[in-house]
Amino acid sequence: MSMFGNVFTRFTFLVGARYGISRKHSQLVSFISRLSTAGLVIGVALLIVVMSVMNGFDRELRERILGIMPQAMIYHREGIEDYEALSLQLKRDSRVLATAPFVQIQGLFSYQKHVAPVNLFGIDPTQETKLSSLEQYLPPLAFAQLEKNPQAVILGQGIADKLRVGLGDKITLIIPRSSDTSAAPGIVMLEVIATLKSNTNVDQSLALMNLAAASNASEFPGKVSGLRLQVNDLFEAPTVVMSAINELPAGYFGSDWTRTHGTIYEAIQMSKSLVSLLLFLIIGIAAFNLVSTLIMVVVDKQGDIAILRTLGASSKEIIGIFMVQGGLIGLIGTSIGAILGVLLSYVITDLISRLEKLLGIQFLHSDVYPISYLPSDLYWSDVLQVAAISLFICFFAALYPAWRASRVQPADALRYE
């Protein structure tokens, strides 16, 4: 503590701050100083924005995609007849919050000359609303129509676009028979009553129909394919499924979101780590500019340093002066960058949306990316982490120029003044 007390005193803070904000430098030194500060601002702002966008993708996966698609599922190879008894058994596990039956059918939709593959779920709308967010992405009364009309179907917006169908159109569902490859595929005529628009990749493959009607069209009429589970912790879903399967008779098997969407989550986390690393390197490059700036200041101010030394300033105080100057540049650049990054994080979604409308293009398509817009979710802990690391890098970068300043010999410096 005594060492730092000798380095950082009121004198070093006053002189270092005066040097830091003074404009009485050579034009080259001033230009390099502004350049290093601008690089720091850009690096910090970009890092905060990118981390917010990655957090947004993470949030949308958890709340939007996994609010629509099942978090965990229990199947039986020959269908489940008494799903209510199975539901009661599964709910004995305190980690299972709710269950709902479903019939899953892999097939094709055909309309005129257009064909699209589909992952069709037969659902009970009354039970589905207890554990999913499907209804909030549908028109009012869509679930009520689905429950009453056995020929009704709700299409994901991506499927509707591929088939070029609208509300009220009749489409054909073609269901291949996996148990008997020689059997003719099932054909069901359905009426489009609504489209699901969640702005995620779910819209490209998901369709919904009445549970009883889907069961009758499936390979096991009168039975459901399985039960969908809502769990209290997403990351415990694999454990919950494994525990349930171990307690059930042979023939049951399970799946969870880590198998269906786990790769998306891992890709988001990996992208966040890699992009953050690259942007931290940008901050590091800005810190190297800071080193150059301070070294040029040392050269430019050799006469002033020599005068301070002759007036009694110690080597530690000279180090402190330039450490304060470097810290001040880092503080200004980091503060402006943090403020800019926070502001951009709050407006980036609307900004990109308006830019897409202005240019008439869409940057993200849900058939390629998990969602079709750029989300943002700012964590203040990320802002503090970025700011702290940036300030540390700047403080570390100022060490060498400060040491160089402390090595200036008064006699040599004043000889040419």
Image (cartoon, rainbow, N blue to C red):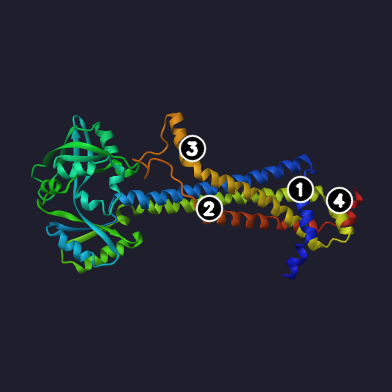
Q: Residues within 10 Å of mark 3 (few under 14, many from 20)?
A: few
**Mark 3: secondary structure:** helix
Label 3 amino acid? Leu
Horizontal and vertical percent for residue 200?
34, 43
User: Tag on residue 277?
Assistant: 2
Horizontal and vertical percent for residue 217?
12, 45
**Mark 1: secondary structure:** helix
> Could you tell me how far apart the alpha carbons at marks 1 and 3 are, in whole angstroms?
40 Å
> Could you tell me how far apart the alpha carbons at marks 3 and 2 are, in whole angstroms?
25 Å
Give the residue at mark 4.
Answer: 303
Asked whether disc 3 touches disc 4, contact meaning CB atoms under 8 Å apart, the reply is no
Left or right position of 309 against 16: right
Q: Earlier in the sequence, mark 1 or mark 3?
A: 1
Give the residue at mark 1.
Answer: 296
Q: Give the residue displayed 12% in from the left and 60% down from the top.
A: 82
Q: Nearer the viewer, mark 1 or mark 3?
A: 3
Q: Earlier in the sequence, mark 1 or mark 2?
A: 2
Left or right position of 306 against 345: right
Label 1 amino acid? Met
Asked whether disc 1 touches disc 3, contact meaning CB atoms under 8 Å apart, the reply is no
Left or right position of 200 against 151: right
Q: Earlier in the sequence, mark 3 or mark 4?
A: 4
**Mark 4: secondary structure:** helix
Horizontal and vertical percent for residue 39?
63, 45
Q: Residues within 10 Å of mark 4 (few under 14, many from 20)?
A: many
Label 4 amino acid? Gly
Give the residue at mark 3.
Answer: 351
Asked whether disc 4 touches disc 1, contact meaning CB atoms under 8 Å apart, the reply is no
